[in-house]
Image (cartoon, helix red, strand yellow):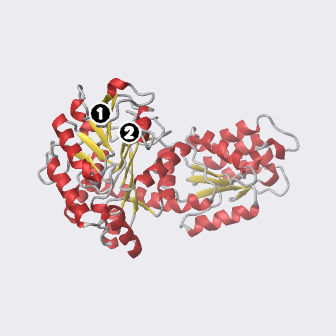
Amino acid sequence: MEQQESSDLNVKDISFINNIKSMAVIGISKKRNFFFLKNHQESFRGSLFAVHPSIKEIPDFPKQNIFASVKDIPSKVDFAFIAVPANKVLEVIDDCIEKGVKLVSVFTAEFSDAGTEEGIALEKELIRRAQNRIRILGPNGMGIFYPKMGITWRTNFPTTPGNIGFIAQSGGICNIAIYTAKEYGLTFSKVFSFGNGADLDFVDLFYFLSNDPDTDIILCYVEGIRQDRANDLRMILSNNKKPTIILKGGKSKRGEIAAKTHTASISGNNRIWNSLFMQYNMIEVNSLEQLLNTARIVDFYGINKIKNIAVFSISGGYGVVLVDIIEDAGMNVPEFSLEVQEKLKKEFFVHGTSPRNPLDVAAQLTHSESIKKIIDIALSDKNIDALIMDFPSWYFSYDFFISPDKNYESNIIEALCLGHKHKKPLFPIIQPANTPADQIRISRLLANKKVPVFSDPLEVIPLLPKINSFKKHQLVNKKVK
């Protein structure tokens, strides 16, 4: 295995991942209905083999691709997914090394994660036997999700390749993120679930994604790293040019104990991590939901400095609430320019509405053409950086209209996409009130048009200052250079 050319940086070379063409699932289980094999069979675009010492036939799987050992496979094997009992893993690793397999993912747990002397010793022996002749993801991890090649450890994972890379110690978090991203319209280049990180750890995988041509945005869930990896991580972060959004686990005392139980990670001093995030311009979030929502904002709209916001509301009261949340987050809801105010006044014709910021459209919301014009004019204001609006989902159901407008939905969808016209983020808050099915339907439709829909203003507004801080540091770094 090649190492990074710089003698100061100790990272493992896994660039070969972009050329995986064949894989074997070792430890297929009849009791589990061949779960991992079937999931990969569903989408893998290369040669797929099944390995088990006694199974000769598998329903709907070619008999000629079943072997007793990975060594018996006549053709090349690039990658192996290992799901055998812990006491069989070392033997399988030996076979994979002899076969020339480049990468294995060890799903099996009960290594250092078990916290026992036996488990720790087994993990040390695993690495000793590998001796840099093979790269290992895990143990106690799901491995790699690689949509471009169809490497998918669960069923119904999306197979559209994208531009977002994700590194996580938790397989469960990866599963939630991948399925949620499918709903949000986010697409992944690669996702790594590395578990205990006995061989390939967070530092190695971050280095790979920071140089991966398929990855533009990096998401991270990390519980901790070994102390001897800190300097390598600093060097990699100092050269990283990609927006990086990170969720740190094990920050509380009980969380740190849970991290040790989960993946045997040393969480470390929170002040050191916080300093790291600030120094190297990483966007830190506090939940998986925030991680994915921030990814939506950055992926759909890019990195924007959002300070002055236009508020669009169907309710004067809800508009006031939005203003309070925005101001509390350190941003402004300013008056529109005089020119824009004059244009807006001409578009308001229903009593009880207001063309000021916040815009209170009330019953005029049923006039879709005017709504489109109002949003277009508001976003044209040079002093406005973004627009946030509330839009209850029942307005997308004709059951609530006295006189249904056949063009209503299409006009409103066009209006909600106007942020892209003005190159300014537009954030619809579509509450699922009373018609949740319509909220889901419209959210999916808008996700395909790169417009992120939220159901609560607290899902988006507190994230904007985090992105602002990233943008600010980005600009400062450019000036320094």
Q: Residue furthest front?
A: 54
The answer to which of marks 1 and 2 sits earlier in the sequence is: 1
> Residue shown at 41%/31% (left/top)?
58
Residue 325 picture location, percent across and down: 61, 66
Q: Residue furthest right?
A: 402
Indicate the quadrant containing the N terminus: top left, top right, bottom left or bottom right: top left
- Left or right of 236 on screen, residue 155: right
Query: Residue 314 appears in which quarter of the rendering?
Result: bottom right
- Left or right of 313 on screen, residue 233: left
Q: Which of 377 and 11 is in front in this view?
A: 11
> Which residue position holds label 2?
146
Q: Nearer the viewer, residue 343 or 171?
A: 171
474 versus 101 height, above or below: below
SS assignment at label 2:
loop
Q: Which mark is residue 20?
A: 1
> Residue shown at 58%/63% (left/top)?
332
Q: Residue 6 carries which label?
A: none
Q: Which of 171 and 117 is in front in this view?
A: 117
Few, some or many residues within 10 Å of mark 2 (<14, 14–19, 20+): many
Q: Which residue lies furthest to the bottom in this view?
A: 253
> Residue shown at 35%/63% (left/top)?
223
160 versus 255 height, above or below: above
Q: Are the residues flagged by discs 1 and 2 in contact, CB closer than 8 Å?
A: yes
Few, some or many residues within 10 Å of mark 1 (<14, 14–19, 20+): some
- Answer whether residue 129 is visible to the viewer in this image: yes
- Residue type pointed to by label 2: Tyr
Residue 350 picture location, percent across and down: 84, 51
